[in-house]
Image (tube, grey):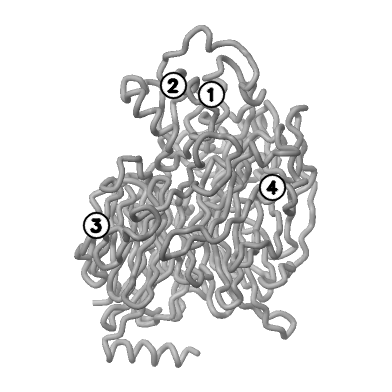
Amino acid sequence: MRRFFLLSSFAALLWGQNVDWSVYLGDKGTTHYSPLDQINKQNVSQLRQVWRHETGDIGEFQSNGLIVDGVLYTASPNRKVLALRAATGERLWTFDPLSERADNPGKRQRGVVYWASGNDKRIFTGAGTYLYALDATTGKPVRSFGKNGSVHMGEGVDTYGNPGPPSVIINTPGVIYKDMYIVGGSTRGPGTIRAYDVRTGSMKWIFHVIPRPGEYGYHSWPPEAYKTAGGASNWSGLALDEPRGILYVPTETAEPDFWGGDRAGANLFANCLIALDANTGKRLWHHQLVHHDLLDKDLPTPPVLLTVKRNGLTIDALAQGTKNGLLFVFDRVTGEPLWPIHEVPVPQSQLAEEPAWPTQPVPLKPPPLTRQNYTAEDVSNISPEAKRMTEVRYKQSGSSGPFPGPSLKETIIFPGFDGGMEWGGAAADKEGVYYANVNEIPWLYQMVPARGSLGERMYQTNCAYCHGLDRKGDAKGGFPGLTDLAKRSSREAVTKIVEQGGGRMPAFGQMRADQRKAVIDYLMGEETPSATGRRAGQGPPYVFAGFRRYFDAEGYPAIRPPWGTLNAVDLNTGEIKWKVPLGEYPELTARGIPPTGTENYGGPVVTASGLIFIGASADETIRAFDKDTGRVLWKAKLPFSGNATPSVYMVNGKQFVVISAGGGKSGRPAGGSIVAFALP
């Protein structure tokens, strides 16, 4: 096999061949794998920046660019679609969704989809609540698709009396199967998976993630919950076994994330890995990896399809990572786990109205990729001051691991709300080794009594976990403050973003009209006396106190390093091969502290030459690691953090590595650059 790849790369160089990266994350099995080996362990140190393109947008730039026939297609931080010459970075065309409609297109789009049949070549992209089909040559909408070039993603989804179709936003692109574009999307309404005809935009099938009467899983909810429950959608992406026609769908928690008192039961198919028949949308098998989620433990990454060898047998497998740093591995055809999964007791609720599920699933193998609890031995050791502070906080708050029971007492949740694994995904090579970056950042968890007027209570239930109970926001987390909103924005603009969503904020168009008006009144300081006081429909009695990372006084994670790592897991044996820090803080290194790793977002790519390319870290750096040892072989500074999975491709016999660099995560500066590297 190695000789084949060497000959392939030599032929590509000799004949001026192109090798595309035509599918999000490399292929439909989301393996993040490239067969190219022109850049190898011996010459990677010579890698140099060869072009840089500025999108003109500023924000979290998470797009994994596609490269087809020498053209790079990507989505900018503001969801414009760009086509560039992949060899030079020269822009060919731009599609701005604002040219089609004035609705907020949103941000944080992780990629686009390419489809071709003869001379009909299309790019599919999401903006606002719409799916667009673009001519890949010109960037113009294909007017025969949907209604004049687009499809409203909520049309055809029954909302049982709620006004209008639900708002569905595509953060992560779907996948092409035969003549269908299959996608999930993020929604506050009922989660669904839908297949659209790539030519016409008509819906060909739909799978209800929150089951209807007569559908499997219906009895895991209260009666008729399908009429009122929301979420349980797929925002993290899909994987496809194309020859077998099996689609794999990881899902998020049901809404609201932190209150489950009104949705008693396991809540299928929330927090599940589901295998569907890609032809019909019919369920084949499933595993729920978090039961009755009360802690926003979405399955945050698409599964990876790979082949492993066990007991002399070759098994087509699937590996699904979680925010808890656990890795579940299944036979992708039968759904049987490769290693036993045990139901482990977890702490129970201290709130009578909020029962927790008694157990949660944990695989026997592989071992967790992160620590599974914050203990007395995990207090920070980067300075005497940090050690003292974290010792005191630990004694006060304590920690009970990744599943603390709902309580009015503050506790340290670890792994935290952003993992473990995150949406960047993982890579896999042909030898059955899985490569994943993970976070080891502690967060704080607490429930508090809901209070105040209808508007304030609706804010506490739906908004405070991002913007804070005090409405001051979280700059490091990317959540703006709302304390002086009336001075900065009009009521019309606030109403629009509440109804339609934008960026990482979901739409609340399905919220009852009186509740939506009340929360906008509260935000704008326009509440009337009649809006105050407790009454029916005000939401749960307890609300989440908000997303809060646990930092020391210097602003570093309040835990003994490492804070972020890159891992290699041999899925033939279920053992971790190596673990190394990912990222560093130069100021800490200068103090004599070994590299700590950093919070990281964005995934790795592995190549046939034995290299792993990854940005992800909060130090504006892209690195190449030796896949066999975890040793850093090369690194280069980026203009902003590369919080996207790189793409690896070849144009005219020359291999490139390209990454979207927009920063904006972990409190880092934000921009909108695309940076490409190649050998001299």
Which of the labelled discs sits on residue 94, or is there none?
3
Give yes or no for contact between labels 3 and 1 (Cβ–Cβ under 8 Å): no
Given the image, on which type of amino acid does mark 2 rest? Leu
User: Mark 1 Cα within 10 Å, few/some/many (few <14, many 20+)?
Assistant: some
User: Mark 3 belongs to which amino acid?
Assistant: Thr
* Residue 37 image position (x, y, % from top left): 39, 82
State the separation of the CA atoms marked 4 and 1.
Answer: 26 Å
Callout 1: SS:
helix
In this picture, residue 446 sits left or right of residue 142:
right
The image shows residue 435 at horizontal and vertical percentages of: 54, 67
The Cα–Cα distance between marks 3 and 2, rounded to whole angstroms, is 36 Å
- Disc 2 residue crowd, few under 14, some 14–19, many 20+, Cα 10 Å: many
Query: Which callout, 2 or 4, points at the residue further toward the start of the chain?
Result: 4
* Viewer-side residue, 551 vs 273: 273
Residue that carries the numbered disc 2 in the rendered image: 523
Q: Residue 212 carries which label?
A: 4
| Amino acid tagged 4 | Arg
Query: Of the residues tagged 1 and 2, which is closer to the observer?
Result: 1
Instruction: Give above or below for 153 relative to 574.
Output: above
Q: Count the numbered circles shown.
A: 4
Comparing labels 4 and 3, the label whose residue is closer to the camera:
4
Q: Which of 498 and 39 is in front in this view?
A: 498
User: Residue sitting at 33 percent across and 46 percent down?
Assistant: 59
Q: Considering only order in the chain, which callout, 3 or 4, is on the residue closer to the N terminus?
A: 3
Q: How far apart are marks 4 and 3 (CA)?
A: 42 Å
Residue 372, compared with residue 102, is above or below; it is: below
Residue 135 in view here: yes
Residue matched to label 1 = 515
